[in-house]
Image (spheres, rainbow, N blue to C red):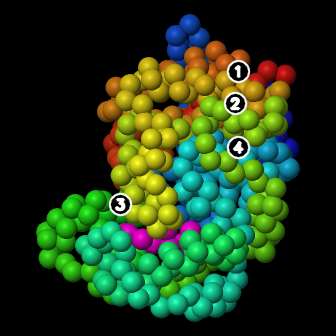
Amino acid sequence: MTGPANHSNDSLARALTGFSSTSGHPTITEDAVIGPDTVRKYTNEFWTSRQRQASSIHEISYRACFKPQLPCFFISLLTRPGDVVYDPFNGRGTTAIEAALLGRNVIANDASPLSRIMTEARFFPPDLMAIEKRLADIPAGSGRAAIDLSMFYHPDTEREIVSLRRHTLGRAEASLDDHIDHWIAMVATNRLTGHSKGFFSVYTLPPNQAVSQGSQRKINEKRMQTPEYRDTRQIILTKTRSLLRSVTGTDVKNLNRAGNSALLLTGDAGKTPKIQDESVNLTVTSPPFLDIVQYREDNWLRCWFNGLDANEIGRQITMARTVERWAEVMGRVFRELFRITVPGGYVAFEVGEVRNRTIRLEEHVVPLGIAAGFSCECVLINQQTFTKTSNIWGVGNMEAGTNTNRIVVFKKPQ
């Protein structure tokens, strides 16, 4: 599916129906009744990590993020270079970065300011030697953190982290920060804790979440481990090399171009007055799913490093505990999406099978989109090889060895 996208219902249907996966499986097409509406449902392996190797610059850890192949599929199918691609729940910035790499313009929003920290720096990848020089210019650490981090870090490692934190926050406060500082802060934020020697911390949970001090003490006791010294500067340089290993000159130009014009917002996805009416060609997003992912608990250490109030941010994150409350919040988001979407534009809204498959959010999302004024083009189900990550969310598996992405596709009438 290459070449200019044809923005007609028939074209989208033909593209999905005629799609053949790398394993040769044809698309399964069926109708699903959702409330008073009948919606076409397409199932296939529309993308895998093997079909198109994603850019290494995506490899930033964060909870509740989808693979780059998902936005790539919809951006390639439904937009042209120069179109505007939007994500109202930006997270680590997967949609934004992928859109930039593909030559599209970018708008992104998230309730957490961490999202901008993780996204903006990657529009402007700096030279490795410039990063090395900047790190060498940062004074050696001499003080400990104001909070107890001894269960995570060797004292000398902690001093280096405090020094990095003081440098990045001080430069920002004095309005002296630049792309190099932003990159260092972004990489350091993503190296704070993890389960290998590529992170600043002793062995802990995977890097997309940070346990509490008390929980880390229990991990240390169970594993009979004591934090060892980790060279933070070398870890930042090593991760930088990894992030940039597949980035080409063309990629850098596309990222820079998109970054220079990008609108990056921090706020309520249901109220985005800075986005003009009928200015977005495609939205690709994955919203917060009920109360499955605890953003505040997962990100308290990242917030500390970046001088942010984790409790205040947590209050801004949609963590609805009932489907009714979740639908109320998402109804406002859909009304806002309808306002900002161009006639003929699309919304690809990824939902999950949650709470052991007892709730299928597409059954609630389809009526919300239609009520906002969209037509529901289809529910696309990408069936793929099972990965451990899906269990974190409660994503229901269709059968042993597989999991799914479920995306509801809407279109704004011409």
Relative to 83, say whether 257 is above or below.
Answer: below
Quarter-wise, where is residue 50 in the image?
bottom right
Disc 3 residue type? Answer: Ala
The residue singled out by tag 3 in the image is 210
First along the sequence among labels 3 and 1: 3
Q: Tell me the element at label 2.
A: helix
Q: Position of residue 101 (x, y in %)?
A: 74, 60
Identify residue type, mark 2.
Answer: Leu
**Residue 202 lies in quadrant:** bottom left
User: Is residue 249 rendered to the left or right of residue 67?
Assistant: right
According to the picture, the residue beneath numbered tag 4 turns out to be: 86
Q: Is residue 193 left or right of residue 93?
A: left
In space, the residues marked 3 and 1 are separated at their CA atoms by 39 Å
Q: Quadrant of the N terminus?
A: top right
* Label 4 crowd bin: few (<14), some (14–19), many (20+), radius 10 Å: many
Q: Position of residue 331 (x, y in %)?
A: 58, 23
Q: Is residue 247 visible?
A: no
Disc 4 to disc 2: CB gap under 8 Å? no
Q: Which mark is residue 337?
A: 2
Q: Do the residues bearing badges 1 and 2 touch, measured as CB atoms within 8 Å?
A: yes
Q: Which residues are magenta?
A: 186-197
Residue at 64% x, 91% y is: 133
Secondary structure beneath label 1: loop
Dividing the image into 4 quarters, which one contains the C terminus? top right
User: Dot 4 lies on which element?
Assistant: strand
Mark earlier in primary sequence (3, 4): 4
Q: Residue sitting at 38 percent across and 46 percent down?
A: 294
Sequence-wise first label, 3 or 2: 3
Residue flagged by tag 1: what amino acid is it? Phe
Residue, disc 1: 374
- Which type of secondary structure does the marked residue at label 3 adopt? loop
